[in-house]
Amino acid sequence: MSAGTEERRVAPAARTWVHRGDGAAMLLVTASLFFVPLVRRVGGTLSISDLVLFGAFWVAVVLGPRPWSRPLRALLWLTALFQVSTAFTVLANPYSANVVEWAHEWELVAGALVVGWAVGASGHVRGGFAVLLAPCLAIAVLAISTSLSQLSAGNLGPVYLSWPFGMHKNVVGDVLAFAGTVLYARPAWLRWPRRVTWPLFAVVALGAVASQSRQGLAGLAVALMIVIVRRYPTNKRSKLPLLTLVPAAVWWIVSSTQAQVDSGNTFNSAYTRLHWYAAALDVWRSDVPFGAGLRWWYTDRFPLAIQPPNAELEVLSSTGVVGLLGFTVLCVGALVVLWRTNPLYGTLAVAVVANRLVQGQLDIFWVTVQTSIPFVVAGLCLGHQSFVDGGGEPALEGVVT
């Protein structure tokens, strides 16, 4: 144990019957997390992340640990309610992309939760996080190196990665915001020392800045504030990000947006978003209760084929008032469930999900890795809590690292 670390072991909670899952299968599911951040498209609309997550889900369901914990069951019921609320638009708008996306959105939330939970509950949480963060760190290094190359050529623009495959600046920023949240929160049960996590946090934060993704930086700022402000015995985190990184991110987001508005250039991202918002509302008015259907922008029924860059407008135009109500219940309910979870495990989970919800206010929400990663992380946290409560590992309390 490192110097300055105080640890007190407490008796585990009352134990119930626990099945840890098939060992080899859970190692396979753990290894699959490496591919979750990979956004490269395979066969058109699906990505490597989608395909791997789909396969890992079924392995986790059939061969994973049992029983599912109470918080996980609560979250899965919320996802089921959302699926029911969006089923109406599938029936009202019969086309193949509608049905595929209906299942895809469930996979991105419920499937990711189950996969993360299975890894944590089988005792592989540390390996799971390490495997998940490895490609994120590679993305950060590529973003920084690309940014330095651009700066040397006099290019002050955002980073769009082209190797080993194309990644939009918002994908880069969002993914690195999740990695930064994990590294800064650094739950005591991960046993990751500060001398390792602080340099890694600096790398992913610089990568996020290089991306110039406003929603990524906004989400990271909110996540860091949640981790800093929420008090519990093991929360001994530096306030430096709250005093430097968070205000700097907020200032840059506000100033850059204001500059776009003041420029009068109707083709910049600020004005374009306002145009897309108005178009999404026009699409919604075509069917107020049930919306125009999931992925309506892939059809030729409307003049503007753009996925709305706002979570609520995306859901409203696609699924109508009924679907938006289900989405609201899912989002608020998930935050409540995770907030009520033991802070030792729930703080990181609620911070990373809140991170994604903030991002979704400024960009598209239902999109592959940006939606699945936070729910995988939440599942990992809840799964490890179940592992500890079931006697798989002694509980820790009063740990200062």
Image (spheres, rainbow, N blue to C red):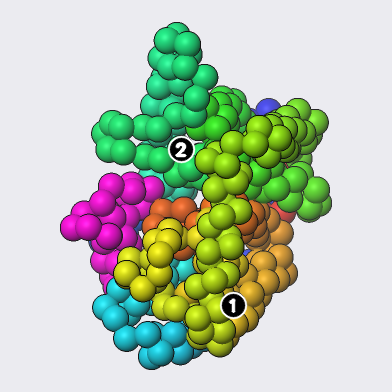
Left or right: 208 in relation to 97 = right
In this view of the protein, which residue sits in the foreground, 106 or 296? 296
- The residue positioned 57% from the left and 42% from the top of the image is 266
Which of disc 2 and disc 1 is earlier in sequence?
Answer: 2
Left or right: 55 in relation to 228 = left
- The residue positioned 45% from the left and 44% from the top of the image is 171
In this view of the protein, which residue sits in the foreground, 316 or 31? 316
Which residue position holds label 2? 169
Image: 347 above or below 177: below
Disc 2 on helix, strand or loop? Answer: helix
Q: CA distance from mark 1 to mark 2?
A: 28 Å
**Is 52 contained in the magenta span?**
yes
**Is 187 contained in the magenta span?**
no
Q: Which residues are magenta?
A: 32-60
The percent coordinates of residue 92 (x first, y second) are 40, 90
Amino acid type at image mark 2: Lys
How many badges with numbers are in the image? 2
Instruction: Name the image quarter holding residue 239.
Output: top right
Amino acid type at image mark 1: Leu
Instruction: Name the image quarter holding residue 153.
Output: top left
Which residue position holds label 1? 324
Residue 195 seen in the figure: yes
Residue, far top: 152
In this view of the protein, which residue sits in the foreground, 277 or 3? 277
The percent coordinates of residue 216 (x first, y second) are 57, 43
